Image (tube, rainbow, N blue to C red):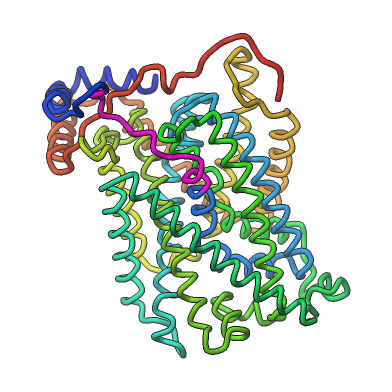
Amino acid sequence: MDGTESHRRGVASQEPGVEDRMLASSDEKGNKGGDDRVTLKKEIGLMSACAIIIGNIIGSGIFISPKGVLEHAGSVGFSLIVWVCGGGICALGSLCYAELGVTIPKSGGDYSYVTEIFGGLTGFLLLWSAVLIMYPTTLAVIALTFSNYVLQPAFPNCLPPYVATRLLSATCVLLLTWVNCSSVRWATRIQDFFTVGKLLALCLIIIVGMVQIGRGYYDALRPSAAFEFIREPSAGQIALAFLQASFAFSGWNFLNYVTEEVVEPRKNLPRAIYISIPLVTLVYTLTNIAYFSSMTPEELLESNAVAVTFGEKLLGMFSWVMPISVALSTFGGINGYLFTSSRLCFSGAREGHLPYLLAMIHLKNCTPIPALLVCCSATILILCIGETHDLINYVSFINYLSYGVTIAGLLYYRYKKPKLLRPIKVNLLVPCAYLLFWAVLLVFALWSEPVVCGMGLVIMLTGVPIYFVGVYWQNKPQWIHSIVEVITFAGQRLCYVVFPQEDPDSTAPVEMEEKSEL
């Protein structure tokens, strides 16, 4: 595909009724005043940008992954090293994404960059795996964690009922979908508020843990005990420990999905990364240290809810604070994932890789309602299927695969277009170091868990025939175009949406003389 322009030309020639109705709607109902374009609004400042990154990273992962990291790392000391190194690797990746974000200033993150650099098929495979499994599954895991922690005080001696957790999870997802459909501003305010809330919850864990350490309760953290192996880890097991930690750190690249809605992205995108990633790494490391101040490694491995076990041991009659705090944390995580993953669907549709309807936004609210409804529906479907925790390794593997392909694209793009304007240009050692770690991690993960990682590859490769039938095949029968037109028009009427009128220069890379490295 030739990107947005070819897609628009195709729609104009094949579906004139839809295009005419969209333009008529825009003329009749569009914003009045100096700028009457219907487009995504730049309403995300530096604070909201930091909240999106922190809010998406800190979800359910820090309350789920410590058990998996410790289990695969084999000792307390190695597990803490994994958490610190995991944050460092995220920082390297974030610097690379900052360069890509201001060089190719499109919403859509990895997908938009890979499509621009490598072409339609590679971009579509990333989009396919993300829409099919990565984000709906992650949203479902976070929503289930939310409902389990909310219901836990009502069922102190047993697991909450299956139906109750699913209903509460679905209700939460539907509520936040409605908020995101109604207003970008309200969605970002919720993100800001709950990001502060989840940081306060983790600060409570850290402060209580530090008090315990000050009182001398740190046997598991002593050098002699910290590297005492529960089981001898292999290189493959350490790789799986990093994959478990990567689930807790996933979301570090999500600000790149909404680049077009960030105020002054060339300044605020890198600033938000520099503030958020070190802060999250510090909080995660201190949280794990706090866990070990009150739990032995064996107790942590036996716990199904680490934060609840921590609260029960140290907070006594106030132990109810912990499940409520985790619920608030995960509620903000659901909002952040909905906000950003819907922009991925929006970007994919704008490039012609998903149905055209998903590239439309509400005429008054300027929110991508069809894309949000698709994300919501996919998440609820996965909630109804059954347990999603077994898919975490699939998600982590596909995530790392996507990151590596995207950062390899940065190196190729420098070779392909050396004179392109790059307001941020990282040292070559940064992407090379990330790719070296990425390659070692994936090789050992494949060696240790060939079935799990192989299934991740299979899920991604199932998109190849879909791409050739749905995207590459241009001369489809007229009856197919007629059905698409009817569905698109019905969707427009139902959701009150039109295709956004963009500034033609706002998302175009700019060529100029190469500048020196920063």
Q: Residue at x 43, y 81 (%)?
A: 152
Nearer-the-camera pick, 319 or 143: 319
Q: Which residues are magenta?
A: 35-50
Q: Residue at x 77, y 70 (%)?
A: 75
In the rendered view, tell whether residue 100 sits above or below residue 143: above
278 displayed left or right of 507: right
Q: How far across and how far down the image is residue 383, in percent?
A: 35, 64
> Dividing the image into 4 quarters, which one contains the C terminus?
top right
Residue at the right extreme, as displayed: 224
| Picture quadrant where residue 469 is located | top left
Nearer-the-camera pick, 446 or 204: 204
Residue at the front extreme, as displayed: 33
Judged by its main secondary structure, the magenta piece is loop
Nearer-the-camera pick, 224 or 240: 224
Q: Residue at x 26, y 43 (%)?
A: 369
457 displayed left or right of 217: left
Q: How many marks?
A: 0
Q: How far across and how far down the image is residue 20, in percent?
A: 13, 22
In the rendered view, tell whether residue 94 sits above or below residue 352: below
Q: How far across and how far down the image is residue 131, in percent?
A: 40, 46
| Picture quadrant where residue 425 is located | top right
Nearer-the-camera pick, 321 or 229: 321
Q: How far across and how far down the image is residue 389, in percent?
A: 49, 66
> Dividing the image into 4 quarters, which one contains the N terminus?
top left
